[in-house]
Amino acid sequence: MLLIAIASISLIVGGIGIMNVMLVSVTERTREIGVRVAVGATEEAIQLQFLGESVMLSLVGGAAGVLGGIVGSYLVGQTLKWEMQMSVEAVVVAALFSVAVGVFFGYYPAQKASHLDPIEALRYE
Amino acid sequence: MLATNQSTIAPITAVDAAVICVEDIHKYYELGETRVHALRGVSVAVHGGEFVALMGASGSGKSTFMNILGCLDRPGSGRYLLEGVDVSQHDKRALALIRNQKIGFVFQGFNLLARTTALENVELPTLYSKVSNEERHTRASEALAMVGLADRAEHFPSQMSGGQQQRVAVARALVNRPSILLADEPTGNLDSRTSVEIMEVFQDLNDKGLTVVMVTHEHDIAEFAKRVLVFRDGKIRKDEPVRNRPRASEVLKTLPTLED
Ligand SMILES: Nc1ncnc2c1ncn2[C@@H]1O[C@H](COP(=O)(O)OP(=O)(O)O)[C@@H](O)[C@H]1O
Ligand SMILES: [Mg+2]
């Protein structure tokens, strides 16, 4: 129970972190978005690009978590002389959660990016 | 050559359809309580192979007009026929396709992506078209060659002069072989020699048949076009052909060279 609570809180905190990074990225790349729209990117294309980036970010986080988990349990196993067991399911679940977090928390920034007015975006300093 | 009533009689069947035909375009901006009437009834036709310069004081509506021509914006009222197709009622997705396929837009700031090479910058529009990787590469290389930058394909924007960056931007505008090249103050950030170099590129492309419309507030630059439209208070007040048009390539020979 406690573990699940800790896990969900970390997911939410991590997700909000991703959302922040993505929002900053959208602002910093306002002109780029303007250019892309001007040369023919549709709203969906811009949305997909930013969703993709936030999923990538989240997957990198997920991978780091899995790696940390493996190393951690190995060290614990070594010191306490426990038998170590790697569960494939856990890794798959971690990957799925990463994607879900990326999509969920990346949605708003991606939406924001795709709704920028290209004329204003191109003038943005 | 202002839009004649001929085009209102048979807009769809008009075979000699102008590349651009706008009829009584108005544009309003809402600014809080006030309403800016930026375009007050603009009508004009531009035919294939023309090279038009738009002039006029700051605030006269040139950019507003260009953004409509470039399908970045829609007119408040009036019609815009691009190659005979009325695009004034198109939805966003349809306009994106038109921008991608039919329009090449060059801006005052070059607007290149800083972390990508010249070639990748030129390829950008093809990412939103159905084009194979191989074709994408060929086309981008060709476009770079057209603006005389074949040897700079792998350079990053920061490694290029302003004039070279603007030429990359022109190549990017050309990569999907558009029907028109639109440029809003393309030489606004460039020194006079580099400006003439850009005009050389434009004249060159225009000689090959490309229709060009550009905004400039410099008379010397407008002279390189074949026709000048003057905007004032949201209307076209003057529409004249350019007589004794200079060749940019000739003018360049008389200008001192600077090393870049
Ligand atoms: N996004 C906008 N919101 C409100 N007013 C605008 C906007 N863009 C342009 N205008 C106004 O419309 C008029 C025409 O502007 P613009 O087309 O940029 O002129 P130009 O390019 O000839 O300098 C000006 O009065 C300008 O202040
Ligand atoms: Mg302007």
Image (tube, coloured by chain):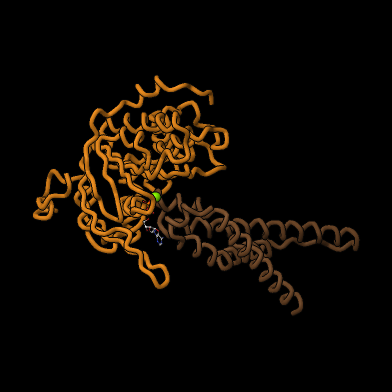
Q: Residue furthest top?
A: B253
The chain shown in brown is which?
A: A
Residue at horizontal 50 percent and vertical 60 percent from the top: A113
Does residue B107 lie above or below B96 as drawn?
above
Quadrant of the picture in which ligand 1 is shown? bottom left
Does residue B97 appear anywhere in the picture?
no
Does residue B142 lie above or below B89 as drawn?
above
Please provide percent x and percent y for residue B184. Answer: 38, 45
Residue at horizontal 52 percent and vertical 55 percent from the top: A30
The colour applied to the residues of chain B in this rendering is orange
Q: Nearer the viewer, residue B205 or B213?
A: B213
Does residue A48 lie above or below B208 as drawn?
below
Does residue A63 appear anywhere in the picture?
yes
Please provide percent x and percent y for residue B156. Answer: 55, 36
Please provide percent x and percent y for residue A115. Answer: 45, 63
Image position of A74 (left or right of B140) = right
Q: Quadrant of residue A119?
A: bottom left
Quadrant in which the N terminus of chain B appears: top left
Q: Quadrant of residue B125?
A: top left
Q: Nearer the viewer, residue B212 or A80?
A: B212
